[in-house]
Image: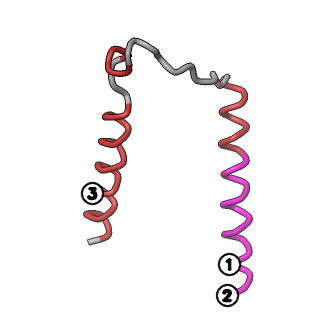
Amino acid sequence: MKTVLFSASALIAMAGMAMANGNPGDFGGQATPVPEISALEGTAALAAVAAVVLIAWERRRRAA
């Protein structure tokens, strides 16, 4: 049941992003500029998220 709910929520989230990624012509020909992210910044962000997850996991493990 969890797998079905997770899959459905992922599908809904992806569909929303796909619809938001319309043609620039849909908005009068004006595309919105977005900031770029380098591989180094992306890796650092993933490392920070992984560190927080590991710290939370360790705290829960020690509390049990």
Residue matched to label 3: 8
Asked if residue 59 is among those painted magenta in the image, a careful observer would answer yes
Q: Secondary structure at mark 2?
A: loop
The residues bearing labels 2 and 1 have C-alpha atoms spaced at a distance of 6 Å
When the figure is inspected, residue 47 is found, relative to residue 64, above or below; the finding is above
Q: Residue at x 33, y 25 (%)?
A: 22
Contact between labelled residues 1 and 2, with CB atoms less than 8 Å apart: yes
The residues bearing labels 3 and 2 have C-alpha atoms spaced at a distance of 32 Å
> Which color scheme is applied?
secondary structure
Left or right position of 25 against 63: left
Pick whichever, 60 or 49, lies toward us.
49
Q: Amino acid at mark 1?
A: Arg
Q: Which mark is residue 44?
A: none
The residues bearing labels 1 and 3 have C-alpha atoms spaced at a distance of 29 Å
Residue matched to label 2: 64
Contact between labelled residues 2 and 3, with CB atoms less than 8 Å apart: no
Chain part drawn in magenta: 48-64
Left or right position of 24 against 60: left
